[in-house]
Amino acid sequence: MKILITVKRVIDYNVKIRIKPDQSGVETSNVKMSMNPFDEIAVEEAVRLKEKGIATETVAVTMGPTQAQETLRTAMAMGIDRAIYVPVDTETQSLSVAKALQRIIAKEKPDLVIMGKQAIDNDSSQTGPMLAALLGWPQGTFASKLEIVEGKARVTREVDGGLETLELQLPALITTDLRLNEPRYASLPNIMKAKKKTLEVTTPEQLGVDFTSRITTQKVVEPPPRKGGIKVPDIATLLDKLRNEAKVI
Amino acid sequence: MSILIIAEHDHKTIKPCTFHVIKAASKLNQPLTLLVAGYEASSVAEAATKVYGISHVLYVDDQAYASFLAENMGLLIAKLAPDFTHVMVAATSYGKNFLPRAAALCDVGQISDVISLESADTFIRPIYAGNALATVTSQDKIKFITVRTTAFEAVPSTGGQATIARLEGTGDSGTSRFISAELSKSERPELTAARVIVSGGRALGSGDNFKKILEPLADKLNAALGASRAAVDAGYVPNDYQVGQTGKVVAPDLYIAIGISGAIQHLAGMKGSKTIVAINKDPEAPIFNVADYGLVGDLFDIVPELTKALG
């Protein structure tokens, strides 16, 4: 079985973001960037399936500026076999990304695609289901458990109020939730080895996908700040405030 | 032209999140159509005709929608969508699962987690876990929108008089199958739906202390239990307790942060809460910058006393 996973380079989850003064977006230069945490889980899941002998080949794909290739190297250092990079300088929208992935998948023919349930920059949570729809594949979103049984994918999903288990025919698409696994750290020898793995470049023109979007960002602003709170001296005052001022208990 | 809203339900009753979506849609002053796709869900369809603000109900009764498989829901909505200007659903695990599929099948984008409708084509949505708000304009012919329900009031479930039409479904894709559901048996409400959340950090010191110190308080308040990433990484509680940018984003009426210093990634997940209480022994902890009410002191003294004082 061949597995294709996707990764995105985003601002590290521990960094406090800064909005550009002209409100055109969020400042990403001179900011620590990392692999989207949900994509790390996708990488880990693919690598584990290979280690178990279920997967025979794992391929990582990313789109974005030149530096996004570093994220592919990280994926390969974690154990992914090879990578495909699509250079895109503009802000990418889910539908265009899904279309580009659809073209790559037509060529690569994986049996399973694993993606993060969302990227922590745009928080859109769309690309996985959009891609599955374009491919006509079944999907298992927000997966917390994945098993390959008798040529089918059995996926446990985190839904509001609990868990749900589905059985999907292959090929299928999975998006990861936090509980699926705990991603490993890349070891130094593996980081060195990853430098020798294949990283192929495919342009949007070669894929025949136009990244111009019909959804445009007008401005990005900070949310209204919370008004300064107070410190209360004791429990009695706290309860009085919660009951009579905030009226929440 | 009309707006299509997808009702969230369990084949018996309409879930309240739907009423918040209707309120959001009503801002655009267009007729509202409510889609009830389910299996033997006639009580839902009937209730739908009475919901305030709805002028028309579409009812599709087919086993293909018994467990709301995304493949089947996506196909149905994509077939209906061209008759509407907007298609809206709550940004829950239900709506987030199938709406992007329907949008892609219609070759249009989706605007997720909308918190404000500025006009028929311009919307505000949180990005970076709510640390920034983006105003976006869509030129797509149909606008697919998921709605963050905490940003809108609910319309009443009664007072409407909608017409109803029964439609044929679009069949079963045959590619996916529902096996089982394991709904939380906990007496406690679920994190993302809870009105009150009691959340603990690394200062709790152990998983045992989570049970001993936080659970009695959560019981008193009928609250969900949450945790910071630090507490999860330390192994005190499972990953699904995690509130924050890489965990769950919550917005309850009351959030009580106990022994949580307030790392950026935690604040990102909870600062939309209506009222925030912080209990921490470090008066300089960043959590106090977002807390409405702060109490400085040792949580091992304060929390049991607070629990007792609640009676």
Image: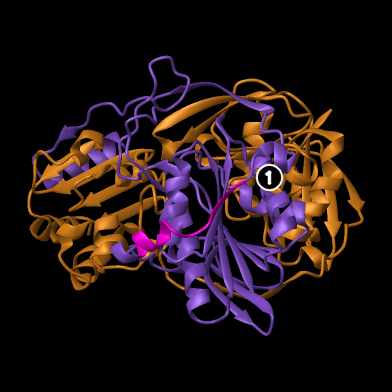
In the displayed orientation, state which residue is furthest to the bottom: A150
Q: Is residue B292 left or right of residue B124?
A: left
Examine the rendering and report whether any part of residue B219 can be seen.
yes
Where is mark 1, residue-wise? A100
Which residues fall within the magenta stretch?
A190-201
Secondary structure beneath disc 1? Answer: helix
Q: Residue at x 31, y 65 (%)?
A: A189
**Foreground of the two, B237 or B39:** B237
Colour for chain B in the figure: orange
Q: Is residue B281 left or right of residue A17?
A: left
Vertical placement of residue A25 versus B170, above or below: above
Q: Is residue A59 left or right of residue B72?
A: left
Q: Please identify the quarter of the rendering in which residue B90 is found.
A: top right
Q: Residue at x 66, y 33 (%)?
A: A211
Colour for chain A in the figure: purple
Q: How many marks?
A: 1
Q: Please identify the quarter of the rendering in which residue B263 is found.
A: top left
Q: Residue B138: x percent and y percent?
A: 68, 26
Q: Residue B230: x percent and y percent?
A: 24, 57
